[in-house]
Amino acid sequence: MEVHGPLRSDDRLKHRPLTPIRFLRGLTCLVVFLSTAFMFLVYFAPVAAGVLRLVSLPYSRKASSFLFGMWLALWPFLFEKVNGTKLFFSGDIVPERERALLISNHRTEVDWMYLWDLALRKGCLGHIKYILKSSLMKMPVLGWGFHALEFIAVERKWETDEPILRDVLSTFKNHQDPLWLVVFPEGTDFSKEKCEKSQKFAAEAKLPMLSNVLLPKTRGFCVCLEALRGSLDAVYDVSIAYKHQCPSFLDNAFGVDPSEVHIHVRRIPVDVIPASASESSAWLMNAFQLKDQLLLYFKTQGHFPDQVTEGELSTLKCLINVAVVISLTAIFAYLTFSSSIWFKTYVGLACLYLASATYFKFQPQPVFGFVKAMFDSKNLKSE
């Protein structure tokens, strides 16, 4: 990985016009991303996240993170190398391949995608998981990917979500499995109207008045921290801001925005955070007060304090990854459309499996673990 000095913020970079070239380039990128996602999912997911999971959960996760990490790496390449978006990092330099719980503000619909740029630099791209609203799991193809990568879908109803959350988190406790679990405690993206509602509630509940973030919902964070505390290295308090204006998904795809993305990270060792639910809730509220101040600083200064040097993405490695992903997709496309009927049958069955598994939230369990659980259960009954 090449290491360069800190990038300089450029105030002249504003919203780029959607020229015909940018439109065609963006359309091509979308076609490439969707086609590669489909082929990778139907050919790899049933094996890596299905059959292999029956044998070994750690090996299944390693295979899935490697294979789908290649596809995820296309996005940082698009952002930084194709669109020319500048990434600025500040705060603490986090170690590579830590097990961490990430809490982030939620400025726009694409915040989560820019965390891939940081995860790629830290060797955790294929191991990053998100807690996201269940409606996103209904997206064609991409919803299958979210399920294969074990993203946690929630309904935003705590009575429904808590048992699901605890059940999934119980499978993430292995110290040997790298993990970045991302939580957006605000629960939704920021807007002026939502901020006003949040401030009104804060005034009634005698909570802190925040202007640049919404009041965090603490229960999900507390459950994640409680369930994973023994296996986590740290909590990363991430603040994301955009120069000039917040981008949409299509802004990213067509390269019209953002010109700059600023990411500030505070690394907090997990044993520093209080263990009780009430104290960890108070800690999170305090963290969002600090985040609010950081974003105010960004508004006035145009950057976060304590800028640090992170390695730039290697153009050569990015191009090699793109070539491998596109080559594999081309081979899979040939096998699907120009080869034996058996490949067409396999693709059809794979689509059926992925759609069903995603809809019913089904994850295969290791056979050995299932047999052991059955055996232990019988022993308990006999006693």
Image (spheres, rainbow, N blue to C red):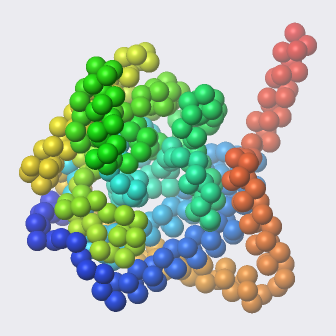
Q: Position of residue 233 (x, y in %)?
A: 40, 33
Residue 125 visible? The answer is: yes
> Residue 11's quadrant in the figure?
bottom left
Image position of 371 (left or right of 206): right
| Relative to 368, residue 2 above or below | below
Q: Position of residue 72 (x, y in %)?
A: 48, 64
Residue positioned most to the right: 382
Q: Position of residue 313 (x, y in %)?
A: 31, 66
Quadrant location of the N terminus in the rendered image: bottom left
Residue nearest the observer in this picture, 306 or 317: 306
Image position of 5 (left or right of 103): left
Residue nearest the observer in this picture, 292 or 96: 292
Residue drawn 38% across the image and 21% down it: 280
Residue 170 visible? The answer is: no
Residue nearest the observer in this picture, 189 or 298: 189
| Relative to 220, residue 354 above or below | below
